[in-house]
Image (tube, coloured by chain):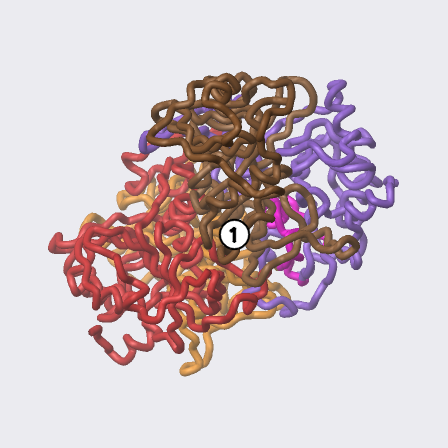
Chain colours: A purple, B red, C brown, D orange
Amino acid sequence: MNKRHATTAEAVAGISDGATVMIGGFGGSGAPIELIHALIDAGPKNLTVVNNNAGNGHVGLAAMIEHGMVAKLICSFPKSKDPKAFTERYLDGRIELELVPQGTLAERIRAGGAGIPAFYTPTAYGTELGEKKPTAEFDGKPYVQERWLKADFALIKAELGDPYGNLTYRLAARNFNPLMATAAAVTIAQVSHLVEAGGIDPEAVVTPGIFVNRLVEVSDPQQEEILNQAEARYP
Amino acid sequence: MNKRHATTAEAVAGISDGATVMIGGFGGSGAPIELIHALIDAGPKNLTVVNNNAGNGHVGLAAMIEHGMVAKLICSFPKSKDPKAFTERYLDGRIELELVPQGTLAERIRAGGAGIPAFYTPTAYGTELGEKKPTAEFDGKPYVQERWLKADFALIKAELGDPYGNLTYRLAARNFNPLMATAAAVTIAQVSHLVEAGGIDPEAVVTPGIFVNRLVEVSDPQQEEILNQAEARYP
Amino acid sequence: MSIQGQLNQEQIAWRAAQDIEDGAYVNLGIGFPEKVAAYTIEGREPIFHTENGVLGFGRAPEKGKEDWDLINAGKKAITLKPGAAFFDHATSFAMIRGGHLDVAILGALQVASNGDLANWRVGDKGVPAVGGAMDLVNGAKRVAVLTDHVTKDGKPKLVEACTFPLTGVGCVTRVYTSLAVIDVDVAGARFVLLEKVPDISMDDLQSLTGAKLHVEGSVADLTVPEL
Amino acid sequence: MSIQGQLNQEQIAWRAAQDIEDGAYVNLGIGFPEKVAAYTIEGREPIFHTENGVLGFGRAPEKGKEDWDLINAGKKAITLKPGAAFFDHATSFAMIRGGHLDVAILGALQVASNGDLANWRVGDKGVPAVGGAMDLVNGAKRVAVLTDHVTKDGKPKLVEACTFPLTGVGCVTRVYTSLAVIDVDVAGARFVLLEKVPDISMDDLQSLTGAKLHVEGSVADLTVPEL
């Protein structure tokens, strides 16, 4: 059992045109910048991307959008300090947006990973984001039915990883990463430290290896926030 | 902020007749024996208990049943090496059983804690445990609708606890405990080691304190399996 | 628009902080509501939750000491207090949706007398963004709003029915404005005035409010420190 | 009932183990199916999952060295291999229901030619207990059954339609019996015979089977070591 890959290019191999790709992170925290940049190098088009946001500046997801790779974005908050990449394309109709309340987005992804095709939530009931969805009453209270979200690939960022794919996360960089790991046919994790089998306490594992298909070590990963402060662009 | 209580008796105070009580553990692993025994001392009747099993021997949940405290049991597997306490009462109609597939039981409790009133699962479709439940098709596949499970109280067992109620668990004694912590109005945890605030690495917390209301330290807790090997009885 | 004796944002935040109990689990919306944390009452220890998976965070780090893996929902760097915990987004919203948060404090474009809230979108122009607002208003035990009493051009923000797109239905139970503290009787679809700044008359306050202000018993003076 | 050349449980388990691939995530049902772990093929490393929240467990500890917080779904003490992980019950069944397990191997009372499985209850007497079986059969990518070919009194366990209460509908895709290896063509509601023990004739095997055994191409000999 060894899920390790030598390079980020190798790790993202096979993500082709039209794929649905979940990308972990909340803003820059937990964003797998190196995997995203490897995907930009590979250059698939017409992707559906699931992320909480829509990128910031000209690196990471924003750079993917600038390179015209994203046909549709499923997210909760497509705003940032420098949201130009997405905003321009959204306003002139070159990119489709499915706006989902953040908790519903998280739960839909979790449901995709857990084999729950649909669930009910009070969130968005009576609002335009709940329109056109089935509703039902339970114990006298109205709820909206929401469907699971799955993906062909997930790109996630973790802190420790072992050859079995067991993962831990760093601080608040956990966010959507463990959920997306469960909801994709192929989950690709960049880890800041690759350790040997047994190098992660079984009680400390956050994402068990069964959810992870490929691992690549990226030591000292870049932070989107720092890159944006330096006005970086990719490539 | 201090959720500590000095004794198990104090920790289980207020659980009165007719309450719904979730009890953590899978068999004896993770079963909060000392809290259960304190509840037997308190003696409320007509309880609805949610547990994966139905007790073993004459301690813990089995002893609660023997003391006539349990009117209804919601569980997945009411069998054990020595299931006499439950079996006798079930067969002569003194205790009601709601049998739930184990994964559905876990998901219903998780849904109760997460504010999801209902969800769909493939589990039990076409079987007698799925009968009389609403069904629906998603993407051409049939599913059963299941409702959330909530409780008035949860009795759980954890390894480390801090004054904020943050918890970790020991080995496979985790099982239902973190789920039940989220699904009860009042969650009561016995912890094997009470540590100071900051004594648990924030990344190692399994149950964040928001889900826990009361804590009591029980050093060297008893194991149901060991008690049963010694043919113990409570009281 | 300047109104005699009206509170500034710091003062509104201060007033809201008076109602946060010791040990309460609190989520503060991005921006204005974040100011509430600064006015925590001595001897009380609320625990702050942020949607992106942290309980028990503290103030911002010194400039230059930021760790960009440790941020809040507003993407600002934070620090931790002892007893903090990290968790994933599903667990974070289980806390919200599951009714575990004691109070969520949010900003508003409009609040209606039936408790409806509009705070995520002005119209159908531009890029819409909702974040966690719709989950918070449907999940927290108590949903409070901080807001100027009227818009910049003097129009009421407290209304009979929201005209902007809704964030949630019948969800707001208390509003802290620049002029008053008002409870929302959701079942009765009524604003109930609890406190008003001393310098404004009942008539003037009513004229700046888009729905009737009911009074039950007496109306207290809304007095706050200089901030 | 003794049938010439039939396999014992160890041998059935051995045969099932031949089909488990390196790196496969596997859940073995309580009892008979647990025997499969002992016959893991040299050079292959399946990872065993147990419903109560462990991935990557190994064999039983020495007697007297049990830690009763470390058990499997059958409540037996286990040990861990390097790379093991613990998780809660919701996550454990997310692995199952979410299609992450490669194979679940279960016992059976009856398997029908349409893939229906009955393995949790004989009738409506006694105490019913289901455990995780209904989740496993609806979740794992491949659901295999280990069973004697016939009951102790010689009745077929492979049938046209189950008469015992169902565990799942159209879920079993392969059956390893004491006499044969049989694929279930769920869509076509057909048993397809892949292998049979050499000592039994096709006619005799068919007479011990409650539904027609189809043959596609050739039928291989089911040969196993002495165990």
Q: Residue furthest front?
A: C199
Tell me which amino acid carries mark 1.
Ile
For disc 1, the marked residue is C41
> x, y percentage for residue D218?
53, 46
> x, y percentage for residue B50?
30, 53
**Residue at figure coordinates x 47%, y 29% from the top left:** B140
**Residue at figure coordinates x 43%, y 75% from the top left:** D67
Q: Residue furthest left?
A: B92
Viewer-proximal residue among C217 and C189? C217
Identify the element where label 1 is drawn: loop
Would you identify the image quadrant in which residue B176 lies? bottom left
> x, y percentage for residue A234?
86, 40
Task: Tell me if residue A130 can be seen.
Answer: no
Q: Is residue D148 above or below residue D63?
A: above
Left or right of A234 in this view: D134: left
Left or right of B8 in this view: C14: right
**Residue at figure coordinates x 53%, y 66% from the top left:** B197
Would you identify the image quadrant in which residue B186 lies? bottom left
Q: Which residues are magenta?
A: A162-190
Task: Tell me if residue D74 can be seen.
Answer: yes
Q: Quadrant of the C terminus of chain B?
A: bottom left
Q: Residue furthest bottom?
A: D64
Give the chain letter at badge 1.
C
Q: Is residue A62 above or below residue A225?
A: above
Task: Check disc 1: other Cα within 10 Å, few if <14, some if 14-19, many if 20+.
Answer: some
Magenta span contains residue D226: no
